[in-house]
Every structure is written in C-alpha cells, then in structure tokens.
Image (cartoon, grey):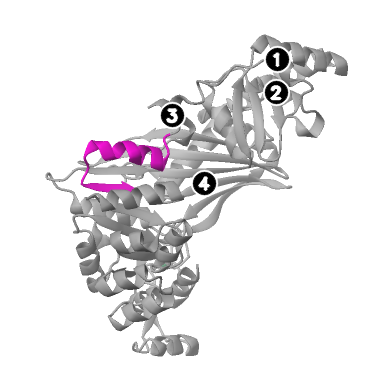
Amino acid sequence: MEDIYSDLLMEKVDLADYKPLPEGSSQYPLEYIETNSIIKLKENEDTIYVGCCDPSNIALLENLRNFHKKRIVFYEIDRNELSGFLGEKLSNLNNRDKKVWTTAAEKLLLDKLANDAPIINLVNSTIIEAIRLGASDIHIECFSSEMVIRYRLDGYLHTVNSLEKENFPAVATRIKIMSNLNIMERRLPQDGRITVHLGDDMVDMRVSIVPIANGESIVLRLFNKKNAPLSLGQLGLSEDNLKLLKKMSGFPNGLVLLTGPTGSGKTTSLNAILQHIKSDTQKIITIEDPIEYVIDGVNQIQTNERIGLTFDSILRRVLRQDPNIIMVGEIRDYQTAELSIRSSLTGHLVFSTLHTKDSLSVITRLKNMGVEPYLISAVLRGSVAQRLVRIICEGCRKKVKPSKNEKELLSRYKLPAGPLFKGEGCKLCRNTGYRGRIGLFEMFMTDNEVEKMIAEGRREAEIRSYLSSNGMKPIIFDGLNKALQGITTISEVERAVSA
Ligand SMILES: [Zn+2]
C-alpha cells in the first residue's frame, strides 16, 4: 500500500535553499501561510513546489491540489525556519502584533457566533428538513441583500428560506466546524464531510465551499445510507429493456457501460443490477465515490483520492481478491479504462459508467481515451443510456389534449396521438405537478456484427442504423411511451433528452 503514504513520506528541504521565495501575488497571503504553516517555494509553468510543516495534514494538501490547476510537489520544511521567515516578513511590515491579534480575535468571534444556539438550530433544522423532504442537495448562498437557502428536490432547486445576510458568516462557520474545515479560510475552496444520525437514518453529506463575489457558496450533497437500493423492476424499464438488461448482466465476463450526465440515475441503476445478480456463488467488489447504497453480500470500497485510493489504484489491488464481478463507479481516464478492459479480458464481468450523451458514444469515448478498437470490440457486451424525468403527481393528474407539436412528435415515432396527462398542482406536490422521478432508457447489446463494425472502426451512425433496424429504440421513444402511459409529460421528456 506504499502509494497511499506518498504524501507522508515527503522529502525534507531547507527553506533557505529556495530564497528568494515567490512574493506578492505569486505567493500565498501571509495570513494563510501563518494559519496553515505552508508556503510556496517555487513555481514554474507546470509545477508548483510547496513547503509544508505538517505532512500529515492531508485535508490541507488536498485543498491545495483542488485549488491549483498545476501539478503540485510537496516538500517538508522546518517549522522554526518558517516562523523565522514569517517573523522577518511581518516585522518588515511593522504590524506583526496587530496582525496576530486581529486573526486571533476574529477566530474567537466566529467561534462564538457559530456556537450560538439560534445558529446551531438554524443549521440543524435546515439539514433535518432537507432529509425529511428527500432533497439531494442543500445550497446556501450569500447574495448582496440576503442569504438564501435552497433545496434540490427531484432535480429542481426550490428556495426554502431567506435570511438577513448578516447571518451568513456564522452559518458558514458552523458548517465548517461540523465538517472539520478551517473556519478562517475564506479565499480558497474547501471540501469536507459531515455524518448526521437522525433516528435510524445515517446521512452522509459531502460539503463543498467555494468563494464567490459576496462571500461563499456552500453546497451540501446528501447521501442517505438508509435508502434501500431500487430493484431492477422499479427503475422504469420497459419490458423489452428489462429483458435485455438482464441478459447483459448475465455474461460471465466482459464490460457493460451505463451512460448519462451527472444526476441521471446511473448509480441507482448499477446498484439495482448488482442487487439483481448477487449470489452466494459469486464475489462482487465495487469501487465507488461515494458509496451511495449499502448492499449486503457485496464488498464495497470507497475511493479516497487524498490518500491515493483512486479508481485505478484500488482496481489493481481488487484483482488480487479473485472477484467474479467488479463495479467501477466511473471511468474517467485512460488508466481506469485500460484496467477495466484488461479485467474484462481476464474473465471478469465489469460494470461501469461513462459521461457520454447516448449509448453508442461509449465507443468513441473509449477510443478517445486511447483504447484500441479491437479491445473495445472484444470486451463490450452492451451499453445503456439513461435520463431521469419527473413523474406526474398522482394527487392532481388530469387528462389533457396534445398540442399540435406534441401530435407531430408522436406521429414521427408512429405512436398514437394521445391522450396525454399533466399535474395541475396540489399540496402533495408543492404545486409543481410532479412527484418523484423515473428513468428513460436506450440500450443495445453487442452481437457478432456490432463487434465486427467496432473492430473495423466504423462510424457511430452506421452502427446505430444497424442496431435500429434490429429493434433498438432511441431514448425519446421510451419517453413518449411513458407520456402516453400518464407517467410523465412530453415537456419533461424533451428537457431530459436534450440534456
Ligand atoms: Zn399534485
């Protein structure tokens, strides 16, 4: 596990060897250097060399990695040497005492504000209400006149509270304290985590804080551990698609990919597949970021980039664990793509996700990542594209006549001209007309002909037309059918499909 500790084993250097150090705008602010015991030693076109006194402060190193676009090399430096350097700097500025005093006083004040009962109550009730409503994210922002709290429900943001903007620093500090972040840091983005226990629920929250013009933007993403994973039957698959997906998941080896933008339900579907195929006779290992659902009988591993546990580094080790089925949360780079393909070639069934617009573009995406077409053709078993649409609220669903455009759209896909449905808005759906979401799907399984076409490097359009003539339906077709069944509206389908 040597690479996990690479940051901890950083080389020790003498600060004096790097003098003159970068200054002014090419150096970190003095306050930041002082608080975090960190300093920029040298910077060139593609690399920043940073000296730090505490190599075990992984959160800080990770923050810097996120902040800088360049490669960062960390060196350990001596704390006394840094203090000496700061002493020189500050006495040169002739305001050393004042500076230290202000920082300390401000920290005390923030601490006091953030631990005030009304602020604690506000933050707690904001989180509890979000969990109760099933929100996926909480957004807390400070605008010029007020501070706004919004929840993302079924994919849409709703304002739930607006308060005087004077409350913002205390709220932001409270959240930083809860997620173990530096409360004095307001210039660099910070990432943290909070775990909340609420009765039987355990909710993990990923916290992201980014400086904006009026202060900071805070986003909490909620992962409720208690949410049971959906079954395959609950995803909204048509009968044909359900059959096809079961078939694809039954291969002894190969690669099955799920595609779609962020928030299109790929992870939920992957978990439903695993739930469906798990059995006593097979070992299933997943590598996830983060683990969204806990599935009994499946070995789930959480990535942790700050200690070097990336998708590819875990995958390398997981292969020694003799798994039958591996789920890799996401293929983001060549290393992960190459390893996933090698695993599929050596007798494992691998599931993963890719950020592509439709089911067929996985071929081009893998090629663009540097994977040879003959390898894609050898391992790819199938691909599923997915989007989410909102479900019409059952409390206020009404039949409606299709518009001229809707009729045209339906007839283009040789579907009946209605009737269609919509939600009029009621208490149950907070007057939105929708409640809950369901998936739209497009998928294909490879056959000898498709494998040949991929290996020959044929264009996506050619492969698509072959598959269409063999029964593959585009994602919009699935959506229009769901609109005719009264599950969703055509405007939802059009919005989802164009995403
Ligand atoms: Zn309603």
Q: Are marks 1 and 2 in contact (CB under 8 Å)?
A: yes
Residue 326 colored magenta? yes
> What whole-number distance in Å separates the C-alpha atoms at marks 3 and 2?
27 Å
Q: Which residue is mark 2?
A: 33
The secondary element bearing badge 3 is classed as helix
Asked if residue 483 is positioned above or below residue 230 in the image, the reply reads: below
User: Which residue is denoted by mark 4 in the rendering?
Assistant: 138
Mark 3 and mark 1: Cα distance apart in space: 28 Å
Q: Which residue is mark 1?
A: 82
Which of the two marks, 3 or 2, is nearer to us in this view?
A: 3
Alpha carbon distance from label 1 to label 2: 9 Å
Q: CA distance from mark 3 to mark 4?
A: 35 Å
Q: Earlier in the sequence, mark 1 or mark 2?
A: 2
Quarter of image, res 356: bottom left
What amino acid type should be assigned to the residue bearing mark 4? Ile
Q: Left of 176 or right of it: where is 92?
A: right
Which residues are the magenta region? 309-330
How far across and down, in percent of the image, does residue 26 sit?
Answer: 77, 33
Residue 371 magenta-drawn?
A: no
> Disc 1 or disc 4, which is closer to the eye?
1
Question: For mark 3, what is the residue?
Answer: 3
Query: How would you rate the neighbour count of disc 1 (Cα within 10 Å): few for under 14, some for 14-19, many for 20 or more?
Result: many
Label whose residue precedes the other's in the sequence (3 or 2)? 3
Question: Sequence order check: which comes first, mark 1 or mark 4?
Answer: 1
How far is mark 1 from mark 4, CA to CA? 39 Å
Quarter containing the N terminus: top left
Q: Indicate the quadrant where residue 29 lies.
A: top right
Residue 15 in percent (x, y) is at 70, 17
